[in-house]
Amino acid sequence: MEKKELMYEGKAKKVFSTEDPSLYIQSFKDDATAFNAKKKGTIQNKGIVNNKISSILFQLVEKKGIPTHFVKQLNDRDMLVKKLEIIKVEVTIRNVVAGGMAKMLGLEEGIVLDSPVFEYHYKHDALDDPLINDYHAIAINLATKEELAYIEKTAFTINAMLKDFFAGLGIDLIDFKLEFGRYGDEILLGDEISPDTCRFWEKGTNRKLDKDRFRRDLGGIEETYQEMLAKVTSGAV
Ligand code: 5GP
């Protein structure tokens, strides 16, 4: 399948049309941004790592019976996906306090939550993706009540599955962000699942194995992305 026309360029990916109107190619870039693009940089080969990790994780999710936009990995940087109408709600699940939750509630990072925290954020760059609840999402027509019920149930299933998978690799899944989209009558998991969109901490040491190395200038960024690719690849076989 060949790329036809650039349809959309985001912070970390380009999306191209193909000869099949129902399929897109998402192409993963090395560009890295943080704090809503106020910080910019490049992480060498990040696009390759995120494409490969996402391809493996989407296939794991599919195996659990959850439909995703993933069709196949085409090459190092490109993934063939179903064309979605993206729902403008970002879904976050948190197992351990970090990042935005630590800041919002004045809590120490690293507190293990008694039960996972589920959040919606309005996908809106100019507003810095504000935290919203289901009433906001329904009232401003981002999604229907039925769609949100499916998204919530599915996100918790994915959390349980990913937590388990990463525990097997000696990694704690701290939190992550998902995006969903409409495809005909179905809702599919979209976007990516990668060290850009999840927080991973090494069990025992709490060494950070994700984009926080870039956000917080912790060094060893490229090496850490490669390390995560090696671990995820080993876990998938
Ligand atoms: P926080 O709200 O703490 O900044 O992010 C929670 C989790 O969701 C983190 O794993 C973070 O990587 C992911 N996340 C939330 N919003 C975004 C976003 O706009 N872009 C990316 N790449 N990840 C996000």
Image: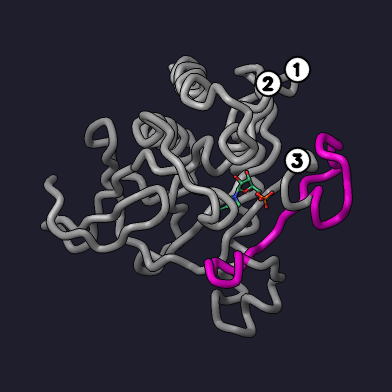
Q: Are marks 1 and 2 in contact (CB under 8 Å)?
A: yes
Instruction: Give the residue pinned by disc 3.
Output: 95
- Residue 79 can be seen, yes or no: yes
Relative image position of residue 150 (x, y in whole percent): 58, 61
Instruction: Look at discs 2 and 3 and give the one toward the viewer.
Output: 2
Q: Kindly state the secondary structure of the residue where label 1 is placed.
A: loop
Q: Nearer the viewer, residue 46 or 147?
A: 46
For the record, the magenta segment spans 102-129
Instruction: Name the residue: 62% across, 75% down.
Output: 137
Amino acid type, callout 1: Thr
Amino acid type, callout 2: Glu
Residue 202: numbered disc: 2
Instruction: Name the residue: 66% across, 27% down.
Output: 208
Q: Kindly state the secondary structure of the residue where label 3 is placed.
A: strand
Question: Circle 3: is it few (<14), some (14-19), or many (20+) Cα within 10 Å?
Answer: many
Instruction: Look at discs 3 and 1 and give the one toward the viewer.
Output: 1
Residue 205: numbered disc: 1
